[in-house]
Image (cartoon, grey):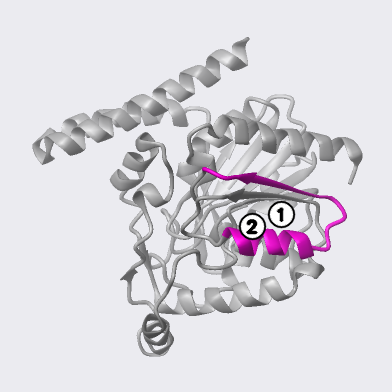
Amino acid sequence: MIVGLIDSLILRLSELDGLIQIEAGLLGGKFNRLYKFAGFTRWLLHMATAHDFLEVAERRLHRIRIGADRGWARLAIAHGYGDHAGRYLDFMNWMAGRGVSCQAIDFHGQGTSSGRHGAISRWEDYVDDLGAICAKSAWDGDDTPLFVLGHSHGGLVVLAAGIGGKLNCAGVILSAPFLAIGMNVPWWRLAVARVGSVIAPSIRVRTGVGGLALSRDETKVAETRADPLCTGVGTPRWFVSMRRVQAEVCARAGEFRIPLLMLVAGADSVADSAASIDFFRRAGSNVKTLKEYPEHRHELLREIGREAIFAEIRGWMETLKGTGA
């Protein structure tokens, strides 16, 4: 009963926050105070969270933690490219209310972590970033089963870590993993990216990803458009390196042996859903489950009807925990 009331409050506050952002945008710049008032609802949503920073090499990574009373599992969350941990608070609060302690980081060059936005030195540094919240030391002695969720580009990071032997967890959940690009990229853009990765690796270029391509939920779309941390840009070095890793991960699908829950969005124009299904079929995991959502777009955890997906994830985790897989 209490959990249900808390969930209802969180969802209503999220909706109020989104509506205020929409109205502020429609009324114009002189009504910025209305948008600032939305900070009050965001403060309420953040009141049960802890924010700090983790140090990885010379990188400073923003982290969000939400603990669960009488927790039975831990969940580390890897966001997508151009994304950030704060966009998963609804999901994290929902899971924490049901016994799953959650942590999420902003990868370097994303959100409020250190580094030029979107830029990288080595793509493999993302794997090291992920390791920071999967390490036992990050959980203050909590030794309940660890699960790892990766959305979009974060899913690619999780798979690369698993295949490379750098991920020790009870199970992996992938939400619309970015294993292949879902839109057509002209050959000349690919050529420009390859040249740019050498002569101007950190120049920021519009990705064209955003808005209704991500979700059918207009409130969530408005939140994304108003979010200053969602800049919608990429860099040549990231793009070229990411495509190399996509090819490597797909080619080595059979080497991924961690229990797997694959969530696929059927109306995804960002990540190629066929590539995700193909990876799932070839994955070496003894325990694996595929869930397809034909009408859903890329951001499954911010889509219409997302609570049903939250429940699918929790149910799979609970079943897996019970099997000792």
Q: Which residues are magenta?
A: 273-295
- Say which residue appears at 56% left-offset and 50% top-offset: 266
Q: Secondary structure at mark 1?
A: loop
Q: Which image quadrant is residue 232 in? A: bottom left
For label 2, the crowd category at 10 Å Cα-Cα, with few meaning under 14, some 14 to 19 and many 20 or more, is some
The reply to whether callout 1 and callout 2 are in contact (CB within 8 Å) is: yes
Q: Position of residue 253 (x, y in %)?
A: 75, 68
Q: Position of residue 55 (x, y in %)?
A: 56, 59
- Look at the image and say whether residue 293 sits in the magenta stretch: yes
Q: Position of residue 260 (x, y in %)?
A: 76, 52
Position of residue 110 relative to residue 201, above or below, is above
- Say which residue appears at 47% left-offset and 18% top-offset: 9
Can see residue 195?
yes
Name the residue carrying label 2.
Answer: 132
Q: Which image quadrant is residue 309 in? A: top right
**Residue type pointed to by label 2:** Ala
Numbered circle sitting on residue 135: 1
Q: Position of residue 87 (x, y in %)?
A: 46, 43
Name the residue at the top extreme. 1
